Amino acid sequence: METTEKLVQTWMASGREEEIEEIVSDIEHDRTSLTDVVKALGEYLTAEDSNVLQKGVELLSLIVAKCPTGKLNKQSVRVLTAFFCGKLDDMVTVKPALHGIATLVSLPTISPAEVTLIIEGIFQHVKMRALVQDIRFKVFSIIDTLMAYHRDVLKSYGRRFLDGYIPLAEGEKDPRNLMVAFAIARVLIIEFDISEHVESMFNILFCYFPITFRPPPNDRYGISSLDLKLALRNCLNATPAFGPLAIPVFLEKLSATSRATKRDTLQTLVTCLPVYGSALARVWARKLWNALKLEIFQPVDPETEEEALKATQALVKTIYADEEEAMESNEDMHGLARDACEECIQILKEPEKSQAKPATKVLCTFLSTTPSVAKYAISQAIPHLNQLFRNPDEASARTATLFLLTEMIKATRDSAAKATETNSALSPYKDDLLAVLTVGLKSQSTRNIALSGLNALCSATGLLSDEEYGYVVHNASELLERSREELDESSDLLIELLKTISDIAPRHVVEQTLPILFSSLPDSAPARTDGPGREKCWQILSAVAKLCTQAELFENLVIRLTTKLDLLCFPSSEQVAAIAADPEPSAAYAHMILKALYQALASKAIMKHVDIAKYLDRLVPSLFNVFVSSAFLSEERPMVASEPRLIEVAGQIINLVVQSVPLQKQQLYAASLSQALLEGDVRSIAYGFQKVATTRSLSIFNEANTPAQRNILHLLASAVIALHKEARLSLTNVDAFLDMLIGWTLTVADNDLQKLSALHIVSSIVNRQVDELLSFLNNKLELFQAAEICNQSLSLDRRRWAIKAWTWLTKALLVRKHALAMSFTEPLYERFNDEAIAWDAAKAIGEIPAADKVLTKANHADVKILYVQRYVGVVLPRLIAFSKDGENPTKQTASLVALTSLIKSIPKAAYAHEIPSLIPLLLRGLELPDSEIRSNIIDTLLVAAEGESPEKSLVAEHSTTLVNTMLKNSKVQDMPSSRVRISALRYLAILPSIVKYEVLHPYKATLLRELAVVLDDPKRSVRKEAVIARSVLFP
């Protein structure tokens, strides 16, 4: 007891937390009790000095708050409740008393008697308007807790509880308190009998509508205007009793000029009308429709119009939902829906007028209400528009009429899709619709709209028959035979229509459309001088690439295009001489064909089509056969398929197919790839029309081989990098194979395609098998750097490719967050002092974390999350430190290069925290002579400027340097690269949005003079950016 008294006295003097903790510990370990604490506090709890009394009650409430629940038995809770309630009538002690009560109401030992005492104490003694926010919040929290755990006790109070609570909540303004008050009010409205308090509850809630609160900047409480709106809305729609009082308020608010008020009112109407019921909605239907109609036909903005349409939909649905079973025919439709439809149809008699579109939107909205209203709206609108279109006296309005008809079709389709129904409402009119839309195809002015309408009609579930799909395809295919100039604007919509049908009835597209498209493609390439011919070929190939993603169509595409490719790559004897003299047209045409195949395949891969895998046996062998055979035959004559750009696209196709192949089949295919790589036996992966590939051995790594044969490594690499970890190449010694590939890259390979292909294989294998290759990697760390990268006796090109090999090894380790990744990065810093390769090593630092198309999840590589962030966290601070070190200019310059390379390769979020220290360094980097580096820096500055404002500008202090540097980089005599000139002008154009006017104003004359010079730039794209920059800087 003495100890407790001393602790209480010490706290009363110091107010320290330690004494409270010690008292609570003593209670917990039975060294004292709450009774002893109250006795020790005796003189303080009855003191006449208000400060002493307040501190005494506060100490007791703090001890109770921290006291273990087990020490607060029923008797203790009863006594404490009575004590704290007795202190509620004193403004000095009300705050600590409420804190104590807040603890007690959450205890399981509190009884209904104490709950009653607390409620009576609060209602009788707490004067909310005299209290500050945090105390009022405590009152609401206490009631909220009681509502959660003792709701039956509060209900037993009957009307007395509401009589006490309503004055308590009335007039509250603080958002933090309102969030709790609204939650309490919703429970009261739903679960308590408020029949005698409807108007009172309405008054204390609707006084807040609409919410106009805007949170202050950097609000630490995180309460938004939307939070309050939703909480209040949940109260307003909690009972139908509010309806008669609420509707006049909503109508009044809709007439307000504030757009935010209109939108809030409309959104609230949407949630309230279904609750208020159909009877009330019918009574107010005409007045509500008149108010909503104004917002639809004369909208203040598109958002408000959209909300008004939703409110109209809710109103109609509420009125007619209960009458659905009684609606047997259109004659049974009465009231608002009939009147509104008649109004809209009257407007649609002049479809070219501005009011026609809003009227159509209203009718489209009716389609998502009830089936009977939807059926009625369709029966009124579609025949009317059909008749208008056919009327020769209304020929001038056909375009507008067809547009409105198309909107109706789309709305009907979409509403049926949401309701998971068939489009039976359109069935009676589909013949007329098909006829009208088909007529619309014939005229250029209505063709685009007709195509859009047909697309909507064809995508409507269960509407058209198979024969009708065939009829649409027939008419669409006829359009394909029109001249390119006539069809130019409609081609995308036409392909989209055919694509929609191909997903439902592909047979018609295969039989009618594809023959027209493929017959338009020549078997031989257009001549070099035939520009229109080449353009036509590309347009047709682009069209079939977009169209032929469905399984049956894609199979047809593969057969047709691979046949064309064979004819191009292995021409007849009559064509050989002409192609040998000028192979470029044929190579360009072959490239188009391969690109079309790749685009179609890429679209299928995005859509995760399962049929891609089967083309490992149908498409991939044909491609290998074409290119391997061409590589052998290129020894005798020039071959079209020996072009590296063709091999690159073919590699992309092979990669996509192998990616999609299941593991078991990949394992078998990996064995065939191994035979081709190690033994030169391509018979199991390359077969087709040409037999030369199956009769000769392809020894890629033999130095005596031709470059054309070595280029085939790219196709093999494209397949290898897509293999699963478990689908391994059949290698007896992986270390030796990787060493051979790296050595071949540095000594034998004679172009970038071959070298990168070899390095991709190395990187892919290391990424998947790193745990088995530690000796190989350690050997590289110890010997490769000294032998290849640091060896100044070697050629500069070989050393640079050694750095690239090092980069790909490091990438393989980094993406899987292997510990050796940072060890491989370290030697690159040491090369910053080597003037010959310093910049190459610096660029490699940035290339290591850059995204690539080899080490990806799609290629089944081992890729861990956040590997970029981990790398940047280690590398970026070091580069910044090196860039600031002026003692070694070579190293400092290389560090700037590394910085620009790194920042280009990573997302802004990874370096955003370092932007203030990066900007001065980036500005220094703009003095480097490399145009690619300058372009990267300016692009980085553009990205960094996103989200900036003149008030919080990071570049304002550098405005002089920025203006002068960007102007210099925008002039052709100072900067040959058009890419840099364009980036510099774009940065000048955003300066007014991130730098204050008074900062930029001194440079006005300079900017005007220099930009006038740029307006004479030889590149049109640069001149365009100069005009934009000038108009932004000097509006």
Image: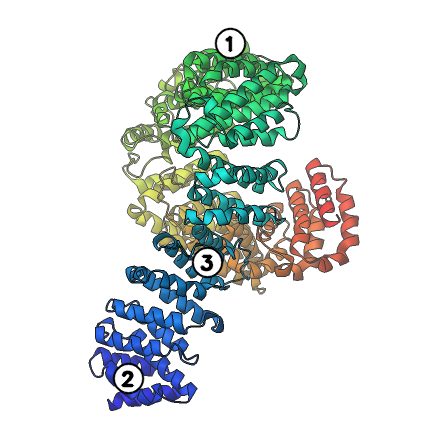
In the rendered structure, are the residues bearing label 2 and label 1 in contact, judged by CB atoms less than 8 Å apart?
no
Mark carried by residue 573: 1
Q: Nearer the viewer, mark 3 or mark 2?
A: 3
- Residue with the mark numbered 2: 38
Q: Position of residue 683 (x, y in %)?
A: 33, 21
Image point 48% across, 39% down: which residue?
Answer: 281
Residue 572 vertical position relative to residue 125 in the rendered view, above or below: above
Residue type pointed to by label 1: Ser
Image quarter where the N terminus lies is bottom left
Nearer the observer, 1001 or 147:
147
Residue 388 in the figure: left or right of residue 510 = right
- Helix or strand or loop: what does disc 1 sit on? helix
Residue type pointed to by label 2: Val
Kindly report the distance in space between the C-alpha atoms of the residues bearing marks 2 and 1. Answer: 113 Å
- Residue 39 visible in the picture: yes
- Residue with the mark numbered 3: 200
How packed is label 3: few (under 14 Cα within 10 Å), some, or many (20 or more)? Answer: some
Image point 58% across, 30% down: which residue?
Answer: 359
Colour theme: rainbow
Q: Nearer the viewer, mark 2 or mark 1?
A: 2
Nearer the observer, 196 or 1003:
196
Kindly report the distance in space between the C-alpha atoms of the residues bearing marks 3 and 1. Answer: 98 Å
In the rendered structure, are the residues bearing label 3 and label 2 in contact, judged by CB atoms less than 8 Å apart?
no
Residue type pointed to by label 3: Ser
Q: Position of residue 453 (x, y in %)?
A: 53, 22
